[in-house]
Amino acid sequence: MEKFLIVKDTTSKVRRFNLSGRILDFKVKPVPEGAEPIQWIKDAIAQLVNKGTEGLSPHDMVGFSFCSKDFKNGEGWIRFQPAGEITIGDIWNTISSIYQSNSKGLNTETFCFRVTSVHLPFGSGRVQKFNNFEEECGARQGIVVINNIDNLCLPRAIVVAIAYINRDPDYRQIRRNIQKIQEQRTIQLLKDSNITIPETGSGIPQLQYFQEFLQGYKLAVYLYGNKGRDVIFEGEDAKKHINLLYHDGHYNVITSLTAAFACSYYCEECHIPFNNRNDHRCGGTCAACQQTPSCSKEGQNKINCEACKRAFRGQKCFDNHKIHNICSEIRRCEKCFAIYRNTRKHTCDEVFCKTCNGHVQRETICVI
């Protein structure tokens, strides 16, 4: 028989660890007639401690606090400690000693008990920085969290994304829903598009409807937890991109793919995050300006750069290589016409050997 009641079960950020924690508030049931009060309450404390630490790993941190209207000196507390080191005897001794010095006796009607538990990332592999979706989205600079209590997180996210893309002067108010401007624009979007959102929220059909309505925009929805490798929806290519992050029925806005997925570069063509420019090469990356998407070869006048001696696919391609400092990184040798990077001194007729992973003369390539 349970001798306690769970009053509240919530998740909140624990400042000490800068992580989300679970907070359980308990009350002890009244002592029944004929039962020995001290033993009843002691058993109840043991039960609620076991309940509060249920499912935790030995290294997870747990803290306790308790209060009563009978306390003269405020609430009592027990510092955070690993779940594997908790003993019910120590907790009971602390509670009983505080009651003896603070009040007339332990009254179950006024006594409340709180257990705060924090899961600490732990293991032999890469350490997790975040415990859940909400925590990571709130910390990432490239993600805008949509806070809503209705079923309109998708259209809300689209409204915020459009405001960001178009540099709307009211973007800050829209993002924070100041004076309900986000809500107003969301309702207007639904009215203009004639799209109805089911009570259960938006799915693939609604994404398709919005993509059809939003001419000039490409809608892409990334699945949380795979650093952008899994895309659950992607519309036809367009000049403006609306990128969203999906998890467990909720949509947030991605304002920067590299910031959201914690990488230096992100290929939208292949959905691959990478940190070094040489780590990924595909048809989606322009061989000339090294940018994504690839610049078109058709209908473009070739432009030569006097500085790096390379040719580019039109004015935009040429401008890209200047803006992103590609001009100072990659050059063409005027003698042997080889293209090389400035990370090492260039020697004519020297090539990179994949067998020995080094630069050798063309005539001396390693043979297996």
Image: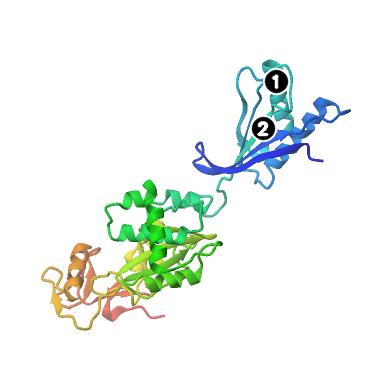
Which kind of residue does numbered mark 1 sit on?
Tyr
Crowding at label 2, few (<14), some or many (≥20) Cα neighbours within 10 Å? many
Determine the secondary structure under disc 1: helix
Q: Earlier in the sequence, mark 2 or mark 1?
A: 1
Crowding at label 1, few (<14), some or many (≥20) Cα neighbours within 10 Å? many
User: Does residue 219 appear to the left or right of 40 in the view shown?
Assistant: left
Q: Residue at (25%, 79%) from the top-left corner? A: 296
Instruction: Give above or below for 348 relative to 168.
Output: below
Q: Residue at (59%, 43%) from the top-left corner? A: 10
Q: Residue at (58%, 45%) from the top-left corner? A: 119
- For residue 301, the mark is none
Residue 59 place in picture, x, y as percent: 62, 43
Which residue extends farthest right? 34
- For residue 99, the mark is 1
Residue 345 place in picture, x, y as percent: 21, 65
- Residue behind mark 2: 113
Q: CA distance from mark 2 to mark 1?
A: 13 Å
